[in-house]
Image: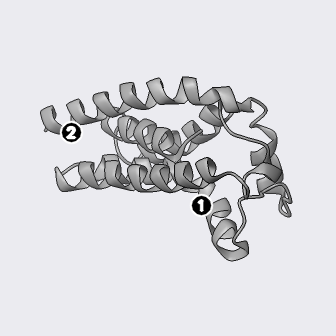
Amino acid sequence: MTGFNHAATGMLIGAAVPFPLAIPVALASHFVLDTMPHYGIPQKQRDKSKFWRVFFIIDFFAAWSLGFFGLTHHHPEMFWAGLVACSPDFFWVGRIVKKRSFDLSQNETWFTRWHAGIQRFERPWGIWLELPLSIVLASIVAWVVLNVT
């Protein structure tokens, strides 16, 4: 699942579930979303794909922008729940930066092996599920942030 969709889902959990209970619920949401069909291409092709690189960078900044949108509109609970919902992927972001490679097929820890293993439905066509989902989630987040005090 894209970081943006993880962040948006976490933010909505932060708005709907009392804090601090929203934090473990947001974390659990990450793994639930990763079990669903979503966008991805084979690991070995990621370093060669310009689209993947651009998509990854845009997704990264869009997720952070959404979180800061909530934070700047006085919804810190939404920001923190969104950040926690994205946090399991931070293991991989660190490795991407360190190895300068998007190939995440070598999972050394039990956690990354398990996390990669639940993403059985990561497919190129998943983008057509994630894009509409991101529009719906972003619209709901924007409505909540701007209309709920």
Is 29 on the left or on the right of 105, as rendered?
Answer: left
The crowding category of the residue bearing disc 1, from other C-alpha atoms within 10 Å (few below 14, some 14 to 19, many at least 20), is few
Q: Residue 57: x percent and y percent?
A: 50, 57
> Are the residues tagged 1 and 2 within 8 Å (C-beta)?
no
Return the disc, 1 or 2, that comes first in the chain's sequence: 1
Q: Residue at x 84, y 56 (%)?
A: 110
Q: Residue at x 48, y 38 (%)?
A: 5
Q: Circle 2 sits in a helix, a strand or a loop, which is it?
A: helix
Name the quadrant of the C terminus.
top left
**Whether residue 47 is situated above or below residue 146 in the rendered picture:** below
**Whether residue 140 is situated above or below residue 76 in the rendered picture:** above
Q: Amino acid at mark 1?
A: Phe
Q: Nearer the viewer, residue 75 or 55?
A: 55
Residue wearing tag 2 = 145
Is 98 on the left or on the right of 12, as rendered?
Answer: right
Q: Nearer the viewer, residue 6 or 104?
A: 104
The crowding category of the residue bearing disc 2, from other C-alpha atoms within 10 Å (few below 14, some 14 to 19, many at least 20), is many
Quarter occupied by residue 13? top left
Q: Amino acid at mark 2?
A: Val
Is 142 on the left or on the right of 34, as rendered?
Answer: left
Q: Residue 31: x percent and y percent?
A: 64, 39
Residue wearing tag 1 = 90
Is residue 137 in sight in this rendering? yes
Is residue 36 in sight in this rendering? no
Q: Circle 1 sits in a helix, a strand or a loop, which is it?
A: helix
Cα–Cα gap, marks 1 and 2: 25 Å
- The colour style of the image is one colour
